[in-house]
Image (tube, rainbow, N blue to C red):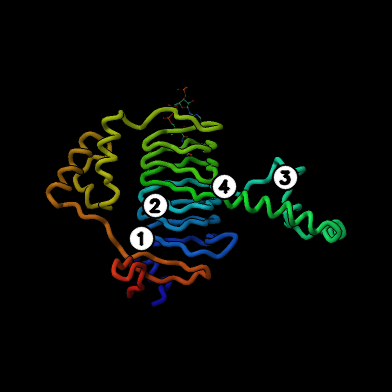
Amino acid sequence: MTATRDMLDALSVRIEPGVTFGHPDPREVMIEPPVLIRPGIYDIDFIGAFTFMGGRQTELRHISMVGRFCSIAYNIMAGVEEHPYDFLSPSPMFQGAFDWRQADRFRAENRDILDHAAHIWWQRRDAQFHRIRIGSDVWIGEGALIRRGVTIGDGAVIAARALVNKDVPPYAIVGGTPARILRYRFEPAVVAALLELTWWNYGLSALDGVDMSNVNQAIDRIATNIALGRAQIYETPLVRLDGSGEASMVRYDRDAGGFVEVDA
Ligand SMILES: CC(C)(COP(=O)(O)OP(=O)(O)OC[C@H]1O[C@@H](n2cnc3c(N)ncnc32)[C@H](O)[C@@H]1OP(=O)(O)O)[C@@H](O)C(=O)NCCC(=O)NCCS
């Protein structure tokens, strides 16, 4: 069944005007409710629950997943295109971009040799453009640039204006150009306990009674909630937006080995 705008509202899947998914080519996206997606250009396969992102000049591309409880600010660029700077010129006009009339004769008379170079570039580019992976409980500050293929670990913080060109370990705070580890959010034993708990897998149910301002108390309480069965793994049907923007609700069916549509 096709989801309606009312259904998205009821699920708190809030997609503001000015959102483009699947740029430049149409592409399916799976969204786990609830989320808030502000204006921007997105190419993301999966967006986890309780995450918000976007606004202003956001362009988040070539991303396989954004986990749960992520806070992704505005003006962030990820997985954006790169140019062949080791060719004579990095200009994309030599790979067939732009239809400038002044280049018509040049293009026509040099088609084969231009196609040859463009082929080499696209092969290399496709081999290099691994998809970015962003874990859960990640905070990305304003204006960060995240390069193709990077993995950002659970709990990491990316400082404003960072240029992230290497994987970021869980719970690291990174900043600068290129980004370096400034410090970790918590001491190693606390980080290890949090990575063991992976509290975000339980949605909010592990967080009952948790004092957010006291991480040690929080760890104890989450562990108790899990041990006593008060916390359940958060599982909810996903909203699937196909390349044309049509929405449907789906869940993963192990027997079918894929997603099946469910009623709203
Ligand atoms: C990363 C951040 C959270 C760190 O905040 P903080 O813990 O208060 O940091 P401090 O001011 O104590 O600085 C700690 C160190 O990190 C450095 N640092 C802080 N922000 C940095 C940045 N954006 N880039 C590079 N280095 C940075 C500081 O210079 C300092 O280095 P030093 O110890 O060598 O002097 C913060 O600087 C930031 O970038 N916030 C993002 C805000 C934002 O984008 N909001 C948008 C709306 S969500």
Mark 4, Cα crowd under 10 Å, few <14 / some 14-19 / many 20+, is few
Residue 234 falls in image quadrant:
bottom left
Q: Nearer the viewer, mark 3 or mark 4?
A: 4
Q: Earlier in the sequence, mark 2 or mark 4?
A: 2
Question: Do the residues bearing badges 3 and 4 touch, measured as CB atoms within 8 Å?
Answer: no
Note whether ligand 1 is within 8 Å of mark 1: no
Question: Do the residues bearing badges 1 and 3 touch, measured as CB atoms within 8 Å?
Answer: no
Q: Earlier in the sequence, mark 1 or mark 3?
A: 1
Q: Residue at x 71, y 53 (%)?
A: 118
Q: Nearer the viewer, mark 2 or mark 4?
A: 4
Q: Earlier in the sequence, mark 3 or mark 2?
A: 2
Q: How far apart in space, not on screen, are marks 1 and 2 (Cα)?
A: 9 Å
Mark 2, Cα crowd under 10 Å, few <14 / some 14-19 / many 20+, is many
Q: Which residue is mark 3?
A: 90
Q: Position of residue 94 (x, y in %)?
A: 76, 52
Q: Which residue is mark 4?
A: 128
Q: Amino acid at mark 4?
A: Gln
State which quarter of the image contains the C terminus.
Answer: bottom left
Q: Amino acid at mark 3?
A: Pro
Question: Which label belongs to residue 51?
Answer: 2
Seen as rendered, the residue at the extreme left is: 228
Image vertical order of residue 125 relative to residue 31, above or below: above
Left or right, 155 with respect to 16, comes to: left
Image vertical order of residue 248 relative to residue 231, above or below: below
Q: Residue at x 36, y 40 (%)?
A: 155
